[in-house]
Amino acid sequence: MPVRLKKLIGTFLLVALVCIYAIVATIFAVALLGNASPWIHLLYFFGTGILWVVPAMFIISWMEKAPKKKAQ
């Protein structure tokens, strides 16, 4: 797959990941942390704010891999 196509696909995947992840994390926060203390909210959003980096790291590493050379 050409590098430019991989980067285009990866860009759309990253944007989708961030949007979906933010919505899901917020839904869980509203459902589970309604009466929790502000410190619990802070810890939850700090953790979920860092956690999205893991799947993004895999997408970015896939985008940056050099294309395989064709065997001759």
Image (cartoon, rainbow, N blue to C red):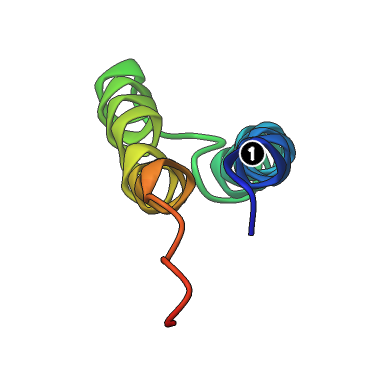
- Residue 57: image quadrant is top left
Comparing 28 with 54, the one in front is 54
Left/right of residue 39 with respect to residue 35 in the rendered view:
left
Give the total of numbered labels. Answer: 1
Residue behind mark 1:
30
* Image spot of residue 18 (x, y percent): 61, 34
Give the farthest residue toward the bottom: 72
From the viewer's side, name the closer residue of 20 and 54.
54
Could you classify mark 1 by the number of other residues whose Cα lies within 10 Å: few (under 14), some (14-19), or many (20 or more)? few
Against 69, residue 48 (above or below) is above
- Looking at the image, is 66 positioned above or below residue 47? below
Which amino acid type corresponds to the residue marked 1 in the rendered image? Answer: Val
For the N terminus, the quadrant is: bottom right
Residue appearing at x 34%, y 35% in the figure = 44
State the image coordinates of residue 35 (x, y, percent, origin top left).
50, 34
Camera-side residue: 56 or 11?
11
Q: Position of residue 70 (x, y in %)?
A: 48, 74
Q: Residue at x 42, y 82 (%)?
A: 71
Q: Which of 28 and 35 is in front in this view?
A: 28
- What SS does tag 1 mark? helix
Seen in the picture, residue 66 relative to 50 is either above or below; the reply is below
Which residue does the image show at 55% across and 40% down from the upper left? 29
Q: Viewed as shown, does residue 40 lie left or right of 69?
A: left
In which quadrant of the rendered image does the C terminus lie?
bottom left
Residue positioned most to the front: 72
